[in-house]
Amino acid sequence: AGNKEGITTFQLDIKCEGLTLDTMAKALGQAREGRLHILGEMEKALKEPRGELPATVPKVMKLKIAEDSIGKVIGPGGRQIRALIEDFDLANIDVEETGDVQISGFDTEQMEKAKEMITLLTSGNGGKGGGGGGGGGRGPRPEYTGPPAEEGKTYEGKITGIHNFGVFVEILPGAEDGSTPGLEGLCHVSELHVERVRNCEGFIRAMNTETLEVIYLGKNKKGQHQLSRKAVLEERGVRGRGGGGGGSRRVENNKPPSPPAPEMSKEEVDVIAQAIDNATD
C-alpha cells in the first residue's frame, strides 16, 4: 500500500527458506513498477480524491452530548429519536449511555441539520419545533404523577424503546387521558439476561414480545429508574452457563484437575514402532 512517493506497508507471506536480500530488492522493484502503473491508470479517470463521498454511499457523523441529556434526544418511548430519523431522512441514530451519538445516513446536508438539531435539543434551549424544526416552542415535558414504584417489586411493563445500551420499560401507567406519562425505567443490556446479550435489539425481537417482567432496583446516582429482568430470572432459578447468573461473568470450575495420562513404557513404544514398520513393508 502506498503512493508515488513510497509505501506505507507491505505483506510478506512466503513460507520457503533462503529468501535473500537480492530477491527481496527485485520483488520490491517489480511491486513499485506495478504500483506506479496502477496509480497512473487511476489518475486518468480521477485526478484527485473527491471532496466528499457520493450520495449512494452511507456516511456517519458523530457528536458528544451530556449523559443527562440523553433523554432529550430519545424522548418518551423513543418518540423524539424516531421523529429525528424520519424528519431528516436518516438511516439511524445510535445513542450510547456515555453520551456518544452516531448519526448515519446518505444525505450529508440532512445529517448536518440533524446534528444541529440534536445540539439544540441538548443545549438547554432545545425542544422548539420538534424533530423537523417547524412550529412553536414546547412547554416543559409533563412528568409522572402516579404512585412511586416499590423497590424490589416485580412489574410487567410495556416496552417503550430499544437501544444498544438497554430497553426502556413503562412499569406504571400514566393518566388515562394521556395528560401525564407513565413511569419509565431502563433495563440495561447487562440486566436483560443471566447470559451476556451482545445485540439488544435482536434479543428483544427474538423474544417476540411487547412487555417485559422486571424488578425495580430503585434510582441510580443520576436519578434514573433502574430495572432488571435478570433478577427475575435468577429468582426463578435460571442460571448462566456454569451455574452462575452474572451475564458475562465466568464461574470457576471447582472440579479437581484430571490426573495426567500414564506414560507408555519403552517396551510398549518399541512394539508399536515395530507394528508400524511391518505395516509399511
Image: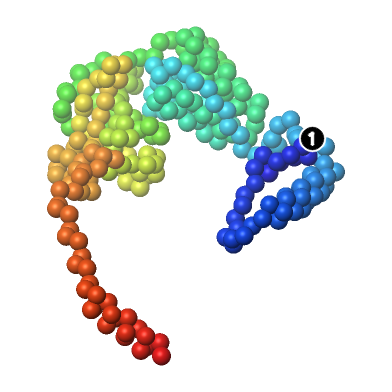
Confirm whether residue 212 shows in the render.
no
- Placement of the N terminus among the 4 image quadrants: top right
Q: Residue 109, how many percent across, how many down?
A: 66, 26
> 189 or 78, which is in the foreground?
189
Q: Is residue 85 left or right of residue 55?
A: left
Q: Callout 1 environment at 10 Å: few (<14), some (14 to 19), or many (20+)?
A: few
Residue at (28, 80) in percent of width and height = 270
Q: Residue 269, how many percent across, how many down?
A: 27, 77
Q: Secondary structure at mark 1?
A: loop
Q: Is residue 149 left or right of residue 94?
A: left
Residue at (54, 26) in percent of width and height = 62
Looking at the image, residue 33 lies above or below residue 56: below
Q: Which residue is mark 1?
A: 48
Q: Residue 220, how many percent across, how many down?
A: 27, 20
In this view, the residue farthest toward the front is: 266
Looking at the image, residue 41 lies above or below residue 141: below
Q: Is residue 106 left or right of residue 155?
A: right
Q: Residue 118, how many percent across, how many down?
A: 52, 19
Residue at (20, 41) in percent of width and height = 245
Colouring mode (rainbow / by chain / secondary structure / one colour):
rainbow
> 156 or 224, which is in the foreground?
224
Residue at (14, 42) in percent of width and height = 236
Q: Amino acid at mark 1?
A: Glu
